[in-house]
Amino acid sequence: ARRETQQSNQRRQEVERLYAFSQRLLGTENVFGLLNRVPSFIVESFGVVGSAIYFENKQKTYYSDIVVQAAIPLEQLQAVSGRGEPVLDRKNGLCYMPIRMGVRPIGSLGLVGCNVSRETQEAIGSLIAIAIERATTMEKLTKAEATRESDRLRSLLLDSVTHEFRTPLTAIKASAETLLSEVELDKPQL
């Protein structure tokens, strides 16, 4: 009963940490800022020593700090991402988990001082993938909205400019037609 109580408390704490982690991920809206902050968010939320994230499409790795760079080899992160299978080395306190978008691996997560369950690690990977997808979508939406607004302003500016030119051009055209019609005009009176 004591062991079950302890396991239950540990699962509850992990769920609370996952919730706090997800809230931090939602607070960051641009992809660049998100990618740079996620490793430190993991360290702060789950109490691990360090973390690293590798993304296949960018061929880039993000670390929580410089010391972690030596502890988590890039080759291992790439191998886990390529295979899509987790590697748990509890003896050395290292855990590697693929980051999946659906069933397709998009990168991998490495943890130093791994003290969280495999299920929590999978949840962390899923949350990261969802947050990146959300931030990417938000950036695309923002760019599309900016483009639409730019087109609207360009159209308004052109309408304004053409309206401003129409009135003087109409007067010039009327004067030119009058001059060309060879109508005899009255002599100016003094």
Image (cartoon, rainbow, N blue to C red):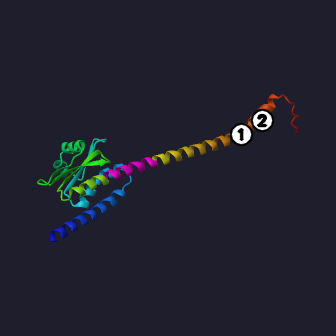
Task: Return the residue nearer the eye: 175 or 26.
Answer: 26
> Looking at the magenta stretch, what is its main secondary structure?
helix
Side of 76 where 153 appears, left or right: right
Distance between the alpha carbons at the discs numbered 2 and 1: 10 Å
Residue 126: where, in percent of width, then height? 30, 52
Q: Does any portion of residue 76 appear in the rendered image?
A: yes
Q: Is residue 54 above or below residue 18?
A: above
Residue 17: where, in percent of width, then height? 27, 63
Task: Return the residue nearer the eye: 123 or 93.
Answer: 123
Q: Does any portion of residue 33 appear in the rendered image?
A: no
The image shows a total of numbered marks equal to 2
Quick one: label 1, few (<14), some, or many (20+) residues within 10 Å?
Answer: few
Q: Residue furthest left?
A: 91
- The quadrant of the image that shows the C terminus is top right
- N-term-proximal mark, 2 vs 1: 1
- Three-letter amino acid code of the residue under disc 1: Pro
The residue segment tinted magenta is 128-142
Quadrant in the picture for residue 9: bottom left
Residue 33 shown in magenta: no
**Secondary structure of residue under mark 2:** helix
Residue 127: where, in percent of width, then height? 31, 54
- Three-letter amino acid code of the residue under disc 2: Ala
| Circle 2 residue | 174
Q: Which disc number belongs to residue 10? A: none
Q: Is residue 176 above or below residue 51?
A: above
Q: Which disc number belongs to residue 168? A: 1
